[in-house]
Every structure is written in C-alpha cells, then in structure tokens.
Amino acid sequence: MQTGLPDTRQIRRICAATLLVLLGACATPEPPPEPPALAPVPVTVKKPKAERIESQPLKHLLNRNLKPMPVQALNVRTKCTFRDAVGTRGKMDLQVKDAEVQRFTAEVNIPKRGICRFDMKNFQQTASLPAVLLADAGNGCSVRMWSQELAGEKSVAVAFSGCQSQCSGDSFSYLWPILVDTRNGRCS
C-alpha cells in the first residue's frame, strides 16, 4: 500500500545523498600543478667606473718648498723640571747619544689625579730610528722619543703609550708628551 509518502528506505537514500553532496562541497580541490621551473637567466651588472680621486694641496701649503725632515740619530741631554698653567709639575733626566738611551727617568705629578713615574731600569730599548722606542714587556708600556721642529725651533718629544701601571689614580688619562728644547735643555 502506497500512501504518497516516501518510505524509510527512500528517506535514508535521500539523506545519504545529501550528506555526500555536503561533504563533497567541504572537500578542498586539488592544487593546480606547479608551472615547470625556468632556467635562471644570467644577470650582468655593470660596475660604475671608479673615479680617480686626486689629492689637492691645502691652500696654505701652495707654493711652499716643504721637504721631509731627514732621519737622523737622536741626540739630547737634559735634567729639567717644569710646571704648566694648570699646576702639573714634572722632572726628567734624559740622555740619548746617537739614538741610544743612556739615562731616562721622569716623574709627572698631576694635581688631584696622581703621579706617573718612569725609570730606565724598567724598560728595554727596542728601536732607534726614526724614533727611539723604549718598551716594558711586562705591562705593555712604551715610551717614544723623536726630534721635531715647531715654528723654527727644534725640540725632542717624549711620549707615553699604554703606561697606566706606571701611574697612580687616573693620572695617565691626563699625561701629555714632554717637550725638550734642544737649544737650552728646558722641558715643558
């Protein structure tokens, strides 16, 4: 007997078909195939041509006949004391003959900073030309001495590098080279 209503088997088939359609709609499609790999194209980059930079003389050096100082063996002898405008006091005993250090002691007292002391017995001479070099292998301190000419006056500079261990406090940060006037042996 048929009443015009679908029976249970038909309802189950319709539900199963609907469920399959819904599940099919949720499924992700296959990704499209990747395009074939292309061979790399060589790229040539042209480098800009390097400009030649030429040194230009400074305007205050134009038309001057400047020559380098000749390399000569250092000769200086002094026992001096000095005091500068800020109160730094110092004394030095130095004798260099034919670029060989015979005597060297120096003491520089920098107010409110400390004292730096240097003695030849702690150093070994490692170079003589163009500048005399004393080195303390134990702590890396080095003392350089060279001849220079400032405003027509010849002098010898004594400079210190890496000598914090020879100085008390932070005095090494304020230690400047000592200049010796070769005409009269005065230092500053």
Image: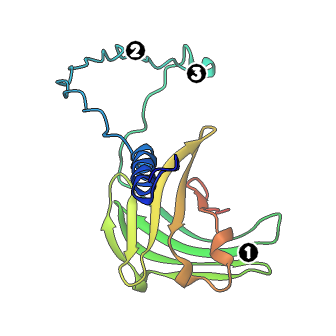
Residue 145, percent across and down? Answer: 46, 60
Res. 172 mark: none
Quadrant of the frame with the N terminus: bottom left
Near mark 1 (Cα within 10 A), the count class, few <14, some 14-19 or many ≥20, is: some
Q: Is residue 63 left or right of residue 140?
A: right
Q: Would you say the residues marked 1 and 3 are in contact, meaning their CB atoms lie under 8 Å apart?
A: no
Q: Which residue is mark 3?
A: 58
- Quadrant assignment, res 157: bottom right
Q: Is residue 158 left or right of residue 122?
A: right
Near mark 2 (Cα within 10 A), the count class, few <14, some 14-19 or many ≥20, is: few
Q: Residue at x 38, y 73 (%)?
A: 135
Earlier-in-chain disc, 1 versus 3: 3
Query: Between residues 181 and 85, which one lies in front from this camera angle?
Result: 85
Q: Which residue is mark 2?
A: 51
Residue 43, percent across and down? Answer: 25, 19
Element assignment for label 1: strand
Residue 188, percent across and down? Answer: 68, 62
Residue at mark 3 to residue at mark 2: CA–CA distance = 21 Å
Residue at mark 2 to residue at mark 1: CA–CA distance = 53 Å
- Quadrant assignment, res 45: top left
What's the amino acid at mark 3?
Leu
Res. 89 mark: 1
Count the labels in the image.
Answer: 3
Element assignment for label 2: loop
Query: Which residue in the rendered view is the most extreme toward the left?
Result: 39
What's the amino acid at mark 2?
Glu
Q: Residue at x 62, y 17 (%)?
A: 59
What's the amino acid at mark 1?
Arg
Earlier-in-chain disc, 3 versus 2: 2
Query: Between residues 71 and 117, which one lies in front from this camera angle?
Result: 117
